[in-house]
């Protein structure tokens, strides 16, 4: 039963039970942070960290559940494939267990046959015992995996409720915020007119309000390759890669769960927030050094044109509705371990020309689909 050893080695490297417990602890810590954030001096910053903490905890829990489901299916399939062999093993063990020990040593051929039978039995029994122990260990692991999935439902429900509460508190805190510096006085009507008349993103950007009076500090160019991805997701489509409709855009697409928080990867000026061309709901940001950041796909936008936002500031939320616990617990046939149904389009431009955004962000193995 070589599969038992192989499966055990894989579980030792990535124990889903441990991952699920760690995720539950993250969600509990996020709940405590939410209570503290309500009294924090900078509620927006504290609540932003809390929302991200919930998102990280829920993502970790989904990954633990995905691993548990994969291992549970692997063990169950292996048991099904070896049904006859396992039945024979269990039958032999049951027969030995039911037979009184003195009778095991009695042989019809007399003392010589009895001696030979004893030698054979002494050689076979350790092997049977070892295989029985391995089988018992895998059955116990299967039981634990099922318990992990059942116990995770409670943590998952608490995490989903807490995340929604944290998002609501963040929205309220942002609505009350009055302390952000303003770089220029925005004219919303003029910005909307520019957006409606624009034929290209370049043309729109060229006609944005004059910002020369308070230039952003230099240094953004030195951040290349070090920026955090603005949403806790994974790269779905790369720079210039065609989508299902064959359309190629000069940006990347990140997939993330519904209602994921989008944050500023650097200190920026919010130049525009609203619909633009065929990009949908768009935020245009200026980080300095002749660069523009374009994010599209947000259902809710925080902030107003002209505001200077610090790094990590909340920019808005992706669309979708909060998934039910049962939906998140359902095995993911795509193997992504989540409910990543919303997308954020990310474009970076320098002096009007698009550049590959992927070279600007730090991506871990889960975020990089390569």
Image: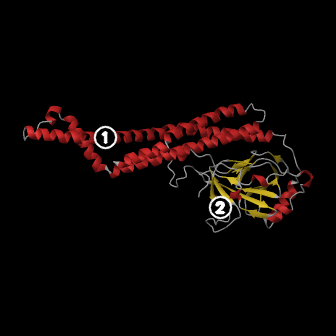
User: Between residues 160 and 145, which one lies in front from this camera angle?
Assistant: 145
Decide if residue 290 is in sight here: yes
Q: Secondary structure at mark 2?
A: loop
Residue depicted at 86% across the width and 59% down the height: 208
149 lies left or right of 93: right
Q: Quadrant of the C terminus?
A: bottom right
Judging by the rendered image, the residue that carries numbered circle 1 is 130
Number of residues whose C-alpha sits closer than 10 Å to that of mark 1, classed few (under 14), some (14–19) or many (20 or more): few
329 lies left or right of 275: left
74 lies left or right of 320: left
Residue 52 placement (x, y as % from top left): 67, 42
Decide if residue 100 is in sight here: no
Asked if 322 appears above or below 291 in the picture, the reply is above
Residue 58 placement (x, y as % from top left): 59, 42
- Looking at the image, is mark 2 or mark 1 earlier in the sequence? 1
Residue 85 placement (x, y as % from top left): 28, 49
Judging by the rendered image, the residue that carries numbered circle 2 is 238
Quarter where residue 46 is shown: top right
Residue depicted at 68% across the width and 63% down the height: 239
Toward the right, the furthest residue is 213
């Amino acid at each position: 039963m070589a599969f038992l050893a192989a499966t055990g080695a894989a579980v030792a490297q990535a124990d889903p039970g441990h991952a699920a417990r760690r995720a539950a602890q993250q969600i509990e810590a996020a709940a405590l942070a939410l209570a503290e954030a309500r009294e924090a001096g900078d509620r927006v910053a504290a609540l932003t960290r809390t929302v991200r903490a919930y998102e990280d905890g829920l993502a970790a829990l989904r990954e633990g559940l995905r691993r548990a489901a994969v291992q549970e299916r692997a063990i169950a399939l292996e048991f099904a494939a070896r049904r006859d062999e396992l039945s024979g093993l269990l039958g032999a063990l049951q027969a030995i267990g039911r037979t009184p020990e003195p009778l095991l040593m009695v042989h019809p051929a007399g003392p010589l046959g009895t001696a030979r039978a004893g030698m054979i039995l002494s050689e076979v029994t350790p092997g049977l015992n070892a295989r029985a122990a391995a089988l018992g260990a895998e059955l116990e692991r299967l039981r634990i995996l099922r318990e992990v999935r059942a116990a995770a439902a409670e943590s998952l429900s608490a995490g989903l409720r807490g995340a929604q509460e944290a998002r609501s508190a963040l929205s309220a805190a942002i609505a009350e915020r009055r302390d952000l510096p303003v770089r220029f006085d925005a004219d919303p009507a003029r910005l909307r007119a520019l957006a409606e008349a624009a034929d290209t993103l370049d043309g729109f950007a060229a006609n944005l309000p004059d910002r020369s009076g308070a230039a952003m500090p230099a240094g953004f160019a030195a951040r290349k390759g070090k920026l955090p991805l603005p949403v806790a997701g994974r790269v779905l489509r790369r720079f210039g890669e065609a989508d299902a409709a064959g359309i190629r855009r000069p940006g990347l697409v990140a997939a993330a769960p519904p209602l994921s928080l989008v944050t500023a990867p650097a200190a920026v000026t919010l130049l525009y927030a609203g619909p633009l061309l065929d990009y949908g709901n768009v935020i245009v940001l200026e980080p300095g050094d002749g660069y523009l950041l374009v994010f599209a796909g947000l259902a809710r936008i925080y902030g107003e044109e002209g505001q200077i936002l610090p790094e990590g500031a909340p920019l808005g939320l992706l669309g979708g509705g909060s998934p039910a616990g049962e939906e998140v617990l359902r095995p993911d046939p795509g193997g992504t371990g989540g409910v990543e149904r919303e997308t954020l389009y990310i474009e970076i431009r320098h002096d009007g020309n698009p550049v590959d955004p992927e070279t600007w962000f730090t991506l871990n193995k889960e975020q990089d689909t390569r």
